[in-house]
Amino acid sequence: MNTNMPPDQLRRNIGQPQRRADILKSVKRVGVFVTVLLVASGCGGSSDIATPVTTVAPVATQAPITTVAPTTTAAPTTTTAPATAAAPTTTTTAPATAAAPTTVAPATTMAPANLPESVNTQVVDGYDFRLDDANVLNHLRLDNEACILHSLGDAIFKALRTRPMDQAETDQVMHCFGRGTEEGQMVDPPQPAGDPPQPTGDVWEGPTICTSHGVFFQPPAFGVAVGQPIADPTATVLDDGRIRLYAYAQGIGLVSAVSDDGRVFTEEPGVRIAGTEAGQPRVWRLPDGRWRMYVSKVREIASFTSDDGLDFIKDPGARLTTQAAGLAAISSPSIVEVEPGLWRMYYSTLGMPGAGPGGKRAGSATSTNLLEWTVDPGWRLGEGAPYLTDSAEHPFPVVAADGSVSLFYGKFRASPGGAPDGLWRATSVDGLTFSDEAYTGLYFGNDPEVVLLPSGERIIYYGDFDPAIGGQLLSATCTEW
């Protein structure tokens, strides 16, 4: 799991093992791999979430990381000033949502925390911020990235890759996160930073059902800067048999590529949905032949429709809201046709600071027109589900010939000492109660999308992240679907 943000911003909806050796064993990599926001992923945020954003004077936060005389420290004011330009970019999302008219423009300033110099320079050996859910780098979104960068300063922002957050830093970024369903209630506010969670083990000795083909897109593809994410793949089969894949490109928007075999893709020119509007997209072919793109907007799921799969126009209203779904934030809408004229959408919690990796769960809703959705009672996966109560995020459904449903989803640090992180698959007879699950073997993979190719073969696309490269897209084949 988005706009023209500063070059060092990250996104986490997809993860990466602590040791590169793990990746080579679990995922057949093609090149080096990347880091993200999921939060989200990295996902598009509605402007009401962005409302609390305020601008922090950058000079004070820059001062601790420089050893020069005070006269020189004024320089960062000039160098960090362009980051303020990110605010108008986020502001442009307001017309496209039903959010409050308040903009992200820096109407006020707040005094930055006096962060000690030691928190800027300290490096913790073996620390992997991707495994530390309290690290703000794992919770960057369209509506908070600029605010967080302003609050911490560029140097501290970079330093958080190498060490846990300090309490003062955590307090300093609290105001950058959106409000909950009730006025004045924060959505999963960050908790004090503690010791980062450690990997559950180096080797998974149990069975796996998928084999990775490796990376097929990574920065600088689509013009994405190295270190930034290409994420959230979604795909459809065109009338001529080719596969069109859409993906979110940091700082650009929703882009697309085409393939004859589903494995080797060629970038298409242009941008399908620009800027902040297309977080965690899922494409669906409508009965009339048009394409609808469902996207995550933090507090709602919105949609766009296209006649040709290239030019999309936003549909009015929301497809599903957090209030209806019973979640503080919602993401990853994925759809299957249950029977003729009846569709089911699966979605999940959107990870937020302090929530912890074990707190995600998946729900579902049905529709007879693909616009209006009614939430199904209960939960499919995660806390509150009948059987599989481990954390589950970004579910993607696959319907078998007998009508049974499989959900591919991300599970991260749900059971310390137990299940490995990455993509899992659960099965259900009725698509509502899931009782069996299997590990795919795609370690630290996330944001899955399964496509049935014209050849009859199924392929799964997913994302992963390497801080040295950025967000990458991979594909895999599974023995069980």
Image: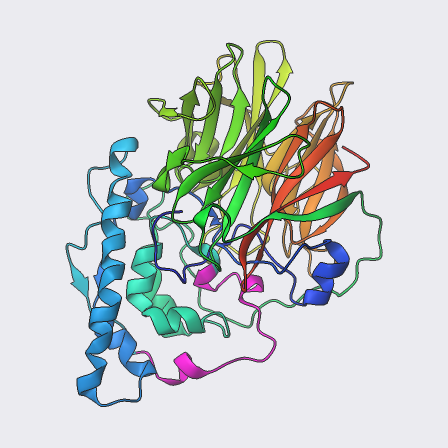
| Residue 271 x %, y % | 40, 36
Relative side of 21 to 239, left or right: right
Q: Quadrant of residue 243?
A: top right
User: x, y percentage for residue 219?
Assistant: 51, 53
Which portion, as a residue range, is magenta?
Answer: 115-137
Is residue 122 shown in magenta?
A: yes
Q: Residue furthest left?
A: 107
Instruction: Left or right? Give the position of 257 relative to 478.
Output: left
Instruction: Name the spot of residue 392 as percent of width and height, x first.
Output: 62, 44
- Residue drawn at x 54%, y 79% as measured from the top left: 124
Screen quadrant of the C terminus: top right
Residue 107, quarter of the rendered image:
bottom left
Q: Return the residue nearer the eye: 447 or 133.
A: 447
Asked whether 475 or 399 is in front, the reply is 475
What kind of secondary structure does the magenta stretch mostly adopt?
loop
Tell me: residue 189, above or below residue 179. Answer: below
Q: Is residue 118 magenta-colored?
A: yes
Residue at 27 percent of width and 60 percent of height = 83
Instruction: Name the residue at 58% across, 63% down.
Output: 131
